[in-house]
Amino acid sequence: MKNYTIDINVDLGEGIGNELEIMPYITSCNIACGGHAGDTKTMHEMVKLAKMYGVKIGAHPSFPDKDNFGRKILEMPSVVLFKSIKKQIKDLLNVTKNENARLHHIKLHGALYNLASIDKKTAKIIIKTIKSMAIPVKLYVPYQSVIASVAIQNNISIAYEAFADRNYNDNLTLVSREKSNAIIFDKATMFNHVYRMISTQKVKTITNKEVAIKADTFCIHGDSPDAVKLVKSLKEKLETKGVIIA
């Protein structure tokens, strides 16, 4: 049987308070760094936890919009967005240095993640920000997205990401959270969703089409109801299929 190796990531430091329970079951985390949630104190707490459990550390920058949890597109001048994203990443980078830890990756949050996936102007701002910092990190991006293409063109190391707890449209965008079928809450459904993507490199969309997809890392949102149970179940079920979580 073919061996598959995947990473499981969760967004943390967002004020949910379940991080200690989630950490044993994941291999990388995306730490809120002040845009949609988080502050210096929570960043230090998350980095310490990640170190304790050997979890790879990522920055999780977003539109600077705590009121809407970063899930609303903000109209911002390019230079303002550039400065905001750079500050968020730099703030977490300073924390990792203070905690003698290493920043492994960057993963955008919410509306910024979705916009950069389809909008070249936004994607270019993100890549320009990362290049300006000259740090050896990966960028977690959706397969066949605009930001993936721009990152590759600029020699930015990427990891393809898919979502364990989200349903997909036929064009590989995520089903809007405003729709009732956007989020996967059932453990068995989530496992089948993820294992299909791993073993066949295809995702079943909401129209029951199977669309090609690649994923190195799978995300479960830390603010989802029963996030702890879902991530624990997913890890255990994948391991029974011989999937290596690393």
Image: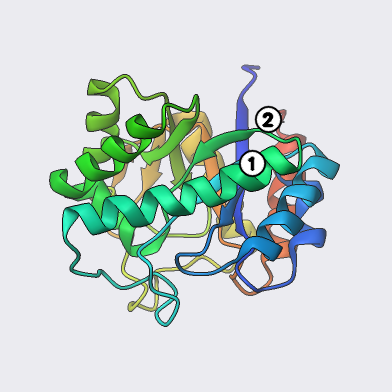
* Closest to the observer, 193 or 59: 59
**Element at badge 1?**
strand
Q: Is residue 174 left or right of residue 115?
A: right
**Quarter of the image holding residue 127?**
top left
Q: Secondary structure at mark 2?
A: loop
Residue 147 position, x and y percent, is: 26, 39
Nearer to us in this view, 1 or 71: 71
Q: Which residue is mark 2?
A: 243
Q: How many marks?
A: 2
Assess disc 1: are there few (<14), some (14-19) or many (≥20) residues with their C-alpha within 10 Å of its C-alpha.
many
**Disc 2 residue type (three-letter):** Val
The answer to the question of whether label 2 and label 1 lie on touching residues, with beta carbons closer than 8 A, is no
Q: Is residue 33 left or right of residue 50?
A: left
Residue at the image point whose x is 72% and y is 45% from the top? 235
Give the side of residue 75 with respect to residue 101, left or right: left
Q: Identify residue type, mark 1.
A: Ile
Image position, residue 47 (x, y; %): 72, 48
Q: Position of residue 210 (x, y in %)?
A: 32, 43
Please tell me which residue is depicted at 40% across the width and 32% down the height of the picture: 214
Query: In 3D space, how far apart are the residues under numbered discs 2 and 1 (Cα atoms)?
Result: 22 Å
Q: Is residue 145 visible?
A: no
Q: Specify which label sits upstream in the sequence, 2 or 1.
A: 1
Question: In the rendered image, which quarter is residue 189 located in?
Answer: bottom right
Mark number displayed over residue 136? none
| As drawn, 130 above or below 81 | above
Q: Nearer the viewer, residue 195 or 119?
A: 119
Residue 57 circle label = 1
How far across and how far down the image is residue 109, in percent? 42, 57
Judge whether residue 197 can be spotted in this image: yes
